[in-house]
C-alpha cells in the first residue's frame, strides 16, 4: 500500500537522462503490494532530456505517494544520493535507480517481514536479472554461487565477493544516518555509492539474501562498468582503493591480511583490464602479484601473451554461458 501517512519504507530513486526508462521504474514501485505505507523519493538531477517532465507528471498524479526533488543544477551521483537520503524519514530504505525496475510486486513485503523480525539484520537483498541493450538477459546471482553468509564485511573488504545489487536492497535508515560518511565519497569524487555503503552497513549488521528474482538491472553503454575509456577505468580502480584504505583506517579492530588484500585488488584490476582488452595494462599489473593459485596463474599467463589474453576473455564468457545453461536446467527441473 502506498498512501499518505508516515511511511515505513522510503524508496529512493536517483535519475539523470533516463527518459526511456523512468516511467517503468516509477510504475514498478507504485505496483508494490504491501500492508504498510511506502513513499517514493525521486532525485531528478537536472536532466537534459524529458526525464524531469516525466517525473513531474507522476508526482502531480500521485502527490501523496511521490516526493520529487528537482535539482537546480546537476549535482552528480553522490551529491544527488545525499540530497535524497536527507529527505528520508522512514524506518527502512530501498534503492531503485531510474533506469532499472522491480519485477516482484511483493519484493518489499518479503524484505520488511525479515527486517521487522530480526534486529540483527541490517540489510536484505535478492537475486535479479541483468538486461542488455540487445534484449538478452542473464541471472545476476547464479544458484551455483557460494552461499551468502550473514556477516560479509571481511569478504567485501577483501574483494572476495561483490556486494548486493543496489536495486535489490532494503536496509535500516538509522545505520546510514548514524554511521555513513557521504562527505568522504563526495570529497574523493567516488564514481558510485554502493561499495562504501555496503561496507559500512555490513560492519555493524548482518546481511540476509533471498534467492527470489525481484528486479531487473539494465546495462547501458554509459555505465561506468561498461566504459572502454582507460582513464575512467583507472578512476574506478583508484576509487575502490581509496574506499578500502578508508575502512582499514576507520576501524582499527580489523584483522586484515594486507598481502592477500593487495593481490585480490590487483586481481580485480587485471580481470577488468582483460575483459576490456587492455593487454599492456593487465601485463603491467600482473608483475606484482604474489598469489600462486590457479586463478592468478591464468591471469599471469593471459597478461603475458596477447593470444592468451584473448583466450582468457573468451573462456570467461564461455563459463558465464555454461552457468546460465545450468541455471535454466535448474529452474526447469524445479518447476517440474
Image: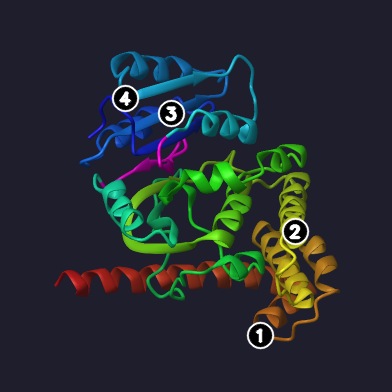
Question: Mark 3 and mark 4: span between their CA atoms?
Answer: 9 Å
Q: Main secondary structure of the magenta part?
A: loop
Q: Is residue 251 magenta?
A: no
First reached walking from the N terminus: tag 4 or tag 2: 4
> Which residue is drawn at the image coordinates 64% and 72% (left, top)?
312
Q: Nearer the viewer, mark 1 or mark 3?
A: 3
Looking at the image, is 73 positioned above or below residue 180? Answer: above
Find the magenta span and give its range: 90-104
Task: Specify whether 198 is left or right of 21.
Answer: right
Question: Mark 1 and mark 4: span between their CA atoms?
Answer: 52 Å
Looking at the image, is 261 positioned above or below residue 38? Answer: below
Task: Tell me the element at label 4.
Answer: loop
> Which residue is drawn at the image coordinates 72% and 50% (left, top)?
233
Circle 3 Cα neighbour tier, 10 Å, few/some/many (<14 / 14–19 / ≥20): many
Q: Which residue does the numbered mark 1 point to in the structure image?
A: 294
Question: Mark 3 and mark 2: span between their CA atoms?
Answer: 40 Å
Q: Position of residue 177 (x, y in %)?
A: 56, 41
The quadrant in which residue 134 appears is top left
Q: Is residue 101 magenta?
A: yes
Q: Which residue does the numbered mark 3 point to in the structure image?
A: 41
Task: Specify whether 46 is left or right of 252.
Answer: left
Q: Position of residue 251 (x, y in %)?
A: 71, 62
First reached walking from the N terminus: tag 1 or tag 3: 3
Question: Mark 1 and mark 2: span between their CA atoms?
Answer: 21 Å
Task: Specify whether 53 is left or right of 278.
Answer: left
Q: Which residue does the numbered mark 2 point to in the structure image?
A: 278
Q: How is the image coloured?
A: rainbow
Q: Cβ–Cβ below 8 Å for labels 3 and 4?
A: no
The quadrant in which residue 24 appears is top left
Question: Mark 1 and mark 3: span between their CA atoms?
Answer: 46 Å
Amino acid at each position: 500500500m502506498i498512501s499518505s501517512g508516515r511511511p515505513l519504507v522510503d524508496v529512493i530513486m536517483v535519475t539523470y537522462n533516463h527518459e526511456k526508462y523512468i516511467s517503468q521504474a516509477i510504475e514498478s514501485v507504485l505496483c508494490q503490494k504491501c500492508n504498510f505505507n511506502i513513499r517514493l523519493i525521486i532525485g531528478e538531477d537536472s536532466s537534459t532530456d524529458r526525464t524531469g517532465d516525466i517525473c513531474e507528471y507522476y508526482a502531480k498524479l500521485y502527490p501523496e505517494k511521490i516526493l520529487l526533488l528537482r535539482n537546480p543544477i546537476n549535482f552528480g551521483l553522490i551529491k544527488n544520493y545525499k540530497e535524497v537520503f536527507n529527505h528520508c524519514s522512514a524506518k527502512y530504505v530501498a534503492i531503485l535507480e531510474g533506469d532499472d525496475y522491480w519485477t516482484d510486486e511483493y519484493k518489499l513485503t518479503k524484505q520488511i517481514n525479515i527486517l521487522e523480525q530480526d534486529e540483527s539484520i541490517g540489510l536484505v537483498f535478492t537475486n535479479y536479472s541483468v538486461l542488455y541493450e540487445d534484449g538478452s538477459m542473464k541471472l545476476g546471482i547464479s544458484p551455483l554461487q557460494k552461499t551468502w553468509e550473514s556477516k560479509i564485511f571481511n569478504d567485501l573488504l577483501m574483494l572476495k565477493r561483490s556486494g548486493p545489487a543496489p536495486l535489490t536492497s532494503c536496509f535500516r535508515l538509522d545505520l546510514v544516518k548514524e554511521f555513513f560518511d557521504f562527505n568522504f565519497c563526495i570529497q574523493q569524487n567516488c564514481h558510485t555509492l554502493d561499495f562504501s555503503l555496503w561496507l559500512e552497513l555490513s560492519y555493524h549488521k548482518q546481511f540476509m539474501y533471498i534467492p527470489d528474482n525481484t528486479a531487473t538491472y539494465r546495462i547501458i553503454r554509459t555505465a561506468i562498468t561498461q566504459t572502454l575509456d582507460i582513464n575512467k577505468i583507472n578512476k574506478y580502480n583508484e576509487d575502490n582503493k581509496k574506499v578500502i584504505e578508508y575502512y582499514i583506517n576507520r576501524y582499527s579492530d580489523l584483522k586484515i591480511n594486507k598481502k592477500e588484500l593487495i593481490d585480490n585488488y590487483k586481481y580485480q584490476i587485471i580481470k577488468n583490464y582483460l575483459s576490456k582488452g587492455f593487454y599492456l595494462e593487465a601485463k603491467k599489473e600482473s608483475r606484482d602479484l604474489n598469489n600462486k593459485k590457479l586463478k592468478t596463474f591464468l591471469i599471469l599467463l593471459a597478461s603475458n601473451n596477447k593470444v592468451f589474453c584473448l583466450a582468457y576473455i573468451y573462456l570467461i564468457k564461455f563459463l558465464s554461458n555454461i552457468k546460465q545453461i545450468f541455471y535454466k536446467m535448474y529452474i526447469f527441473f524445479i518447476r517440474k
